[in-house]
Image (spheres, grey):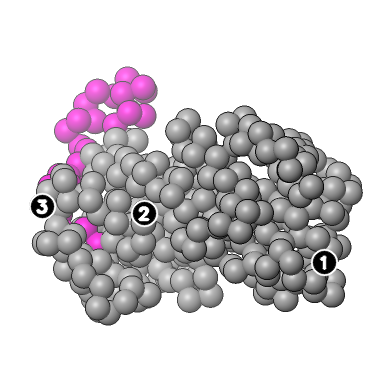
Amino acid sequence: MAKVLALDPIHPDGLDLLRARSDVELVHLPNPTEADIAKHIQDAEVVLIRARVLADDMFQQATRLRLVSRHGVGCDNLKFEVLQPLGIGVAIAADSNLISVAEHAMTLTLAACKDLDRANGAVRDGKWAIRENLKARDLNGSQTLVVGFGRIGQAYAQRAAAFGAQITVFDPFRPKDAGLPEGYSLADSLAEAVSQADIVSIHMPRTAETSNLFDRDLLARMKPGSIVVNTARGGIVDEGAMAAALDAGRPGAYATDVLLDEPPHPDNPLLGREDVIVTPHSAAMTMQSTIRMATRSAQNALDFLDGTLREDMIALAPAPRDQEPCAK
């Protein structure tokens, strides 16, 4: 019998998929201590994990572990350089939250375009006259740069285009021969593209190459009054540089669902500003997406055990189940 260890709160629909299998032993720890995890991970073949970070030695002691099934898409909390030599793979819930995140990015885009946060706060304070001083703009006709054109970037671009935005795509990892939807344009230079954009929406993973990609120099190239939207990862935008850039009016607003430190430190330079909208890394946390992430991560675990794990769900290839465990 294969043991699957599920950590932290998981929607019951996902747990039920695992419980329905007579050949699977499910251990669910909704609020585990480190000792709880250490006890149960040792003989688990699959661990289902959300955003929790496990110590390197936890994986090294897991002599039967073959797969980490992510309840989500990002892998910031996992060290591939630790997992790969141990023969431990990573599966992601690749098709689970793209609609929710794309919709959230659109929400942030529209909120920033319409100066919605400032308008709402002013009316709550009895300042109806704010309507004469809002920095509102139309999304229709805007030059909108989509940085990263994977599943979520594509879904966002479709929605922005439906509002009449002019879409430009920048993605250095996209194959050169990959086509674009009619009416979209492809940018070869990020620096040149941001200088022409009214709106920039970020949809890239955080890697060594993208860390602090939006730094002081790049932000200085932006149009006065432009908008940056980030539903990707904290750390892609240099937050200190962004605060300084906002002071200079380039860009004019920043709307983000992610920060470098979450929850943020009270002295984060972006907090408390009228030209910044921050949501608590909640883009994927809709009712529907929560169910999809739970069921997809559970199904990935079962598919791995059955030898049918889909290629598009694999972020790091696992060792075969019948292969002898690596020295750990």
Q: Which of the marked residues, 1 or 2, is nearer the chain's N terminus?
A: 1
Could you tell me which residue is drawn at 21 percent across and 70 percent down?
179
Q: Is residue 58 magenta?
A: no
Image coordinates for residue 204, horizontal then vertical, percent: 42, 63
Q: Is residue 130 magenta?
A: yes
Which residue was labeled with disc 2?
152
| Residue 146 vs residue 130, the one in the foreground | 146
**Amino acid type at mark 3:** Gly
Q: Which of the marked residues, 3 or 2, is nearer the chain's N terminus?
A: 3
Mark 3, secondary structure of its residue: loop
Q: Which of the marked residues, 3 or 1, is nearer the chain's N terminus?
A: 1
Q: Is residue 188 visible?
A: yes
How packed is label 3: few (under 14 Cα within 10 Å), some, or many (20 or more)? few
Task: For marks 1 and 2, give the CA distance.
Answer: 34 Å
Could you tell me which residue is drawn at 44 percent across and 56 percent down?
232
Task: For marks 3 and 1, give the CA distance.
Answer: 54 Å
Where residue 149 is drawn, which disc sits there?
A: none
Using the rendered view, name the quadrant where residue 8 is placed.
Answer: top right
Q: Is residue 90 left or right of residue 35?
A: left
Circles 1 and 2, Cβ within 8 Å, touching? The answer is no
**Amino acid type at mark 1:** Gln
The residues colored magenta run 119-145
Task: For marks 3 and 2, give the CA distance.
Answer: 22 Å
Where residue 141 is drawn, which disc sits there?
A: 3
Image coordinates for residue 134, horizontal then vertical, percent: 22, 38
In the image, is residue 318 above or below residue 291?
below
In the image, is residue 240 above or below residue 114?
below
Mark 1, secondary structure of its residue: helix
Which residue was labeled with disc 1?
60
Image coordinates for residue 200, horizontal then vertical, percent: 29, 59
Q: Is residue 213 left or right of residue 53?
A: left
